[in-house]
Each structure stands twice: as structure tokens, then as C-alpha cells.
Amino acid sequence: MGIEDAVRDIGEKFDRALRESDFWPAMTWLGDQFRRRGPIKLWVVGGTIRDFILETSNMIIDVDLMVEGCPSMEVLEEAIVAGGTFRRNMMGGYKWYPSPEAAGGKEGLEIDIWRIEESIEPGDPATPEMGVSRFDLSINALGWDVEEKRFIDPLGGLEVILDESKSRPMELLTEKIKPGNAGRLILRAVKYAPKLGIGLGEKSKRWIRENEAELDELSDEKIRYVFRAIDYRSIRKEIEEFCDEILSPARASRIKNALFGGQ
């Protein structure tokens, strides 16, 4: 199957799974709220797509949304507060907890939401392609147009994910990394490459070697926080091997000790 056919096939499966998921009633409710406030569009982005393709369960396990055309954070907040509670998330947006009324009777849902403008740099065009291109890894730079049922893939992440041989590497998105964030970006590579079994490109490896000193600014607690969402102890061997491959011996030991020290 060629890449175009594979993308079309996975798109059909993703749309069907999304509409059958627990998140769909809340997304439908949210879309209605936004339409009352203007031509505002919802995109499913990032890890939601990545994990669906790489997992074999054909289920949507979480949802990250990016909002296009929303005039301000105040308008976004007005919409979500009408149907639940929220707190600010680390991406500059919101973690929304829809009420059962908004979520079709479902309870305990969490949906991350942010405006395109919160993920791009000043002066960049506020397009969905630019928004996802400012994520951390090429395999996360993906979007799904909920209305038009299509993917955007400006950096080739789908080809990497769909490559069953795992021969295509992923890349760190370092073009406009903000000062002080290099250490966290490096840790994202250390987290996902071993977890997903996808290698890292040579360009990204060189960048890590040039910037690994920023890892020294992160406490052990912050290092573990980056890994909190995965069972990293179950892939200890893979993480340790990856650290030894891309980091200097001292910094590889530092990361391994922060994650596994005393175990």
C-alpha cells in the first residue's frame, strides 16, 4: 500500500474511532459553542493521532484540540466555562473538564485545548500547519480537521509513524526553541524514541550534543515529571541505551540516575 492510500485508510479509521469515542459528545458540544461565536474551527492534534496509529486498540485514549480562528483567549475561555471547569496547561492553553451535561453524560473526561496563537512565534502566520510545526517532535506535528476529515502533516510525521520497518527517523523541532527549553526538548526525545521504537535523525542528535548542557538546569524531579505519563521503568533498558547513544557519559548517567537511581 502506498503512503497516500495508507493515509486515506488511517484517516477513515481515525474519524470513525473519534466519533465513537467518549470524547465526541463533548467535542460536538464545544463545536456548537464556537460556531455561536464566529467561524472558529477545531483540530485534533499531536499525540492523539500518533498514539492512535501506533496502538493496536483502534481507540481514542485522549484528545488534544487546537482552535483555529478564535479571536482571543477570553472567547475560548468563555466557551469552555459554559460547559465545565478548567485549569491552565503547560502548553499555554487549558485542560478542560467537561460537565456531564456537555459530555453526553460522561464523567471524568480531560481535554487539552489551546489557540493556534499560543503555539506559534510572534510574526508567524496563524495557520494550523504552523501551529503543529511548533510542537516538540516531527511525529507530533500532525493535525486532523474535524469538519473536513483530513490530516495535515507539514513535516512528514505520518510517514515516520506508518513505516512498519521503523527505519525512518523522527526529528526534534528545534528551529525556534525558546531559551531555557532545550533540556526539556532533549528529554522528550529520550522519552519517545525508546517508548515508540523510532530512531532519532542525525540532525537532531547533533543538536542534542550542542545543547545538552541545558540538562544541568533541570532537577531530578523535573526530569521525572517529563516522563510521568509513561511507565518508563518498563523500558529501562531502552532508555539507558538511548541515553548512552546520544548524550555524553556524565549527562547520560545523570538522566539514568534521576529516573532509576536506587532501583
Image: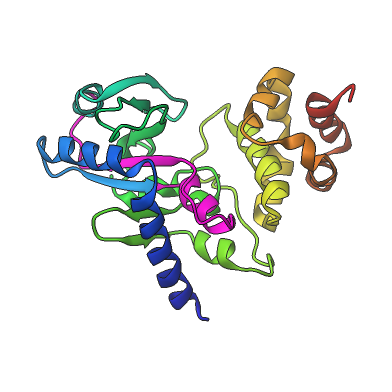
Compared to residue 263, the image places residue 38 above or below, namely below
Left or right, 181 with reference to 107: right
| Between 206 and 40, the one nearer to me in the picture | 40
| Between 82 and 25, the one nearer to me in the picture | 25
Q: Residue 75 placed where, x, y %?
A: 18, 27
Compared to residue 68, the image places residue 2 above or below, namely below
Residue 214, located in which quarter of the rendered image?
A: top right
Q: Residue 16 placed where, x, y %?
A: 37, 59
User: Residue 247, can we see it?
Assistant: no
Determine if the magenta segment contains residue 62: yes
Compared to residue 185, the image places residue 3 above or below, namely below
User: Residue 195, can we see it?
Assistant: yes
Magenta residues, as a range?
45-74
Q: Say how many tags the image has.
A: 0
Q: The C terminus is located in which quarter? A: top right
Left or right, 144 with reference to 213: left
| Between 236 and 71, the one nearer to me in the picture | 236
| Residue depicted at 33% across the width and 62% down the height | 150
In the orientation shown, which residue stands out farthest toward the front? 105
Determine if the magenta segment contains residue 142: no
What's the colour scheme? rainbow
| Residue depicted at 30% across the width and 61% down the height | 149
Residue 107, located in which quarter of the rendered image?
A: top left
Q: Residue 168 placed where, x, y %?
A: 64, 65
Left or right, 181 with reference to 115: right
| Residue depicted at 44% across the width and 53% down the height | 142
Residue 255, located in which quarter of the rendered image?
A: top right
Q: Residue 157 placed where, x, y %?
A: 52, 59
